[in-house]
Amino acid sequence: MTKHFLLLALIFTITAPAYAQEVTAEKAAIIQAKIQKQLDEVKTQYNSDEPAARTLTYNGNVKVEPSGDYYAITSPPISVTFKDKNRRIEIGMISTNAKPTDKAGEYKTTTALPDPVMISYDETNKEVMRITIGSQKTMGTWNEDKYTFEQAIGQYSDIKASFDQGAGMFNIANLAFKEDNTENANGSSDGVFKAIAKDINFLSKQTAKQNESKITLESMMIESSVKDLDLSNSHLDTFSDLDNASVTLSYKGLKSTQTASAEKPNGGTTTMDSGQIHFSFDTAENKNVNAALGLNFNNIQSDGIDKKSNNLAPENISIQLKQNNLPIAAFEEIFAGQSPENLKSMAPMLLLKVPAILSQAGSFLEIEKIAINNSDYDVALNAIARADIMAAFSATAKGSLKVKGMDTLIAAEQSQGGGMMTKIKPLGRTEGNTDIFDFEVTKEGKVLVNGQDAMPVIMGARLPTQAPVKTTP
């Protein structure tokens, strides 16, 4: 499993008893030994990632005791020490009741997180962060053979985090999640996860270095899915077998407010109706990856922007990109085991090798849409760029840029000392109130805009203007 997920795996491992049979003291001892082994594996792998930087330790061993028709499982307290500044994180004991079902290897679980959930200390042993939880409910169905939950739900309220002894505060009024996993005929798994948080508040109080600021969100949602996930090798290495996945982060009702200061006497407020970030990928049979990225931000408003002098501030942004036939395996082979120092020395070689790898794989980038607008202008771009080692720029491209309100953009640019749009405007063609620039980067290295050679204009726009030399008469 990817190192960043090992602490989550640790918590889930604690809830993973081994035998769906009659609850007895003998079997409790067997379960305890198995869970302890799994915890030790998590610790070994976590500590192997940059071992000089951090250390995961357990303050004791896991305990498993029979209690009626279920096993009572208690994890040891967990510590993570960051060696650069001797900072550390403390997580308390996690308690789980696991009841065997009629299905072998399956358990119904209820889990209680500690309160406080986590405390962080600085190098002087002063508390710098504390996370607490008001109420909680966590239930699941655990499959010991797959080392995962077939189903899990959680409901929490009044989650609070305090920073630097009250200098910063973070609060979530309500948080809920649900996870469902199903097994396919070939033994792989499909899974979906969804979490929703409501009434989110973050407050940073005024200090000598910064003004008081507050950020609020009406709601935030995370949705993710995986397909054909192979869990047969090891519960510690599942993400190396992840071929298809997607994750979406969306939110509503964002408001950011900063109080007045000497530098900004009137303060400022920025709002956004909604936003969304989406990423997905799938792996083809030849192990090449197709990935997609989407960004959408709607109705951005800020009273800190003087639109009389800056008409460029966007109100809506939409970006949709797709990268096709990305040869991940080839790049993994190049970068595997390389230190940052080695990668720096390899830079000249990579500049030559990467275009060849992309070209051989038939890799290409689709800019399905980049749209930026406000009430004064609307800019839309779409294009396709293809890797081609035989091309002058190691790639070719073709696309179209459409601009409404270009005169407004030119005036705003000139007010800030720019002038590139003034130079490229004659290359466009006009349809109604829209300036259109159909462009192409050819294999021979030409840059064409509406059939015209645009290279002199582009190079001229980039050249700095030299100040006149003063002479003494």
Image (cartoon, rainbow, N blue to C red):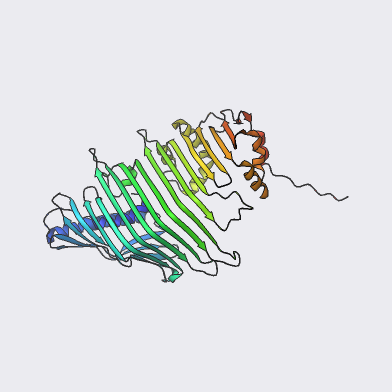
What is the x, y in percent for residue 9? 30, 54
Q: Which of 164 and 177 is in front in this view?
A: 177
Left or right: where does residue 330 sit relative to residue 237?
Answer: right
In the image, residue 438 sits, relative to residue 66, either above or below, namely above
Q: How many marks?
A: 0
Q: At 52% across and 69% down in the image, what residue appears?
A: 207
Residue 80 occupies quadrant: bottom left
Left or right: where does residue 83 sit relative to residue 234?
Answer: right
- Asked if residue 154 can be seen in this view, the reply is yes
Q: At 46% across and 34% down in the image, what residue appears?
A: 363
Q: Which of 6 and 174 is in front in this view?
A: 174
In the image, residue 53 sits, relative to residue 433, either above or below, namely below
Q: Which of 241 and 369 is in front in this view?
A: 369
Residue 227 occupies quadrant: top left
The residue positioned farthest toward the front in the image shown: 432
What is the x, y in percent for residue 405? 60, 42
- Asked if residue 17 can be seen in this view, the reply is no
Q: Which of 432 and 247 is in front in this view?
A: 432
Q: At 79% across and 47% down in the image, what residue appears?
A: 469
What is the x, y in percent for residue 171? 39, 64
In the image, residue 201 sits, relative to residue 368, either above or below, namely below
What is the x, y in percent for residue 391? 55, 29
